[in-house]
Amino acid sequence: MLSYLLKEENCFIKESVKDWKEAIHVACESMIEQGYCTQEYEKAIFDSTEQYGPYYVLCENLALIHASNHSGVNETQMAVTLLKNPIKFTQDGYDVRILVTLVAKDKESHMAGIVAVSNIFSDEKKIQTLLDAKDGKEIYRIFSENS
Amino acid sequence: MAIRSIMCCCGQGLGSSMIVSMNVEKALKNLGITGVSVDHTSLNEISPDLADLFVVGFDLAPQMTAYPNKIVLNQLMDMNEITTKLKEVFDKQ
């Protein structure tokens, strides 16, 4: 079941972000406001990015934004932000329009969410449907159907 | 040595390694290979005796020089690449 991992109100559409740092901030905002993680978690993502590069950009259009479960994680939860205009995390990197925020308490509790990400992003048609989503409700429906 | 266990690894052991482990399971099924356990974890939790075969993304390959039995993926989400590379490894057995 995906419903305990992703809520419709945490599926967003946003016009654009000015840089990758704002992308991460936007991706973490709802999770911090709702107490699933703290500011420490967002900081851990920035710190890891400085150390390793944008390890969460998995393919064209997708950033699975997360850090380890060692700092600032309260409860497992996800959020999805669809950007109308793509952002790059490195100059020569992929264009990214879908930010999937992952707050994971342990190694397994977010499985249903990863199943959905994997099912959507292994199918060009599903990726396009997600990129064309008009509102959060539609984004949520696509994730639900694929979990 | 017969491969009985595969460990998929990434930096945090939560995101891409979980996706890759699902894709490895799908690929093994497609190839008709059974009796292999597939798991995922972070790079700092592994040792060469933890699994018979390791799977990592290309960005982490430099940290895996002590692991002779590994598959390095150029595209983490590409089912074709993982299927081809697994087939190569299992065909050699």
Image: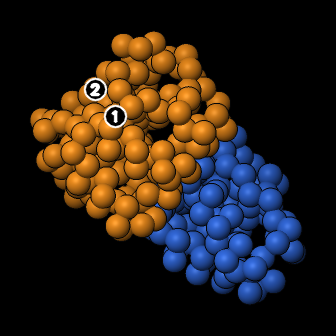
The residue at which mark 1 appears reads as: A11
User: Residue A101, position in %: x, y?
Assistant: 41, 35
Task: Classify A128 as above or below B34.
Answer: above
For the residue pair A84 and B68, the one nearer the viewer reads as: A84
In the rendered structure, the residue with mark 2 lies on which chain?
A
In the rendered image, what is the letter of the chain coloured orange?
A: A
Q: Colour of chain B?
A: blue
> What is the x, y in percent for residue A129?
30, 58
Instruction: For residue B14, say whether it is visible.
Output: no
Helix, strand or loop at label 2? It is helix
Residue at the image point whose x is 44% and y is 46% from the top: A143
Q: Is residue A7 above or below residue A87?
A: above
- Three-letter amino acid code at disc 2? His
State the residue at coordinates (47%, 33%): A6
Query: Looking at the picture, which amino acid does disc 1 mark?
Result: Cys
A11 displayed left or right of A117: left
Q: Where is residue B90? Give x, y as percent.
A: 74, 80
Mark 2 touches mark 1? (CB < 8 Å): no
| Viewer can see residue A52 | yes
| First along the sequence among labels 2 and 1 | 1
- Residue A95 coordinates in the image, percent (x, y): 23, 55
Q: Chain of mark 1?
A: A
Point out the residue furthest to the bottom here: B91
Marks 2/1: CA distance?
A: 15 Å
Q: What residue is shown with label 2?
A: A25
Determine crowd level at label 2: few under 14, some 14-19, many 20+ residues with C-alpha closer than 10 A.
some
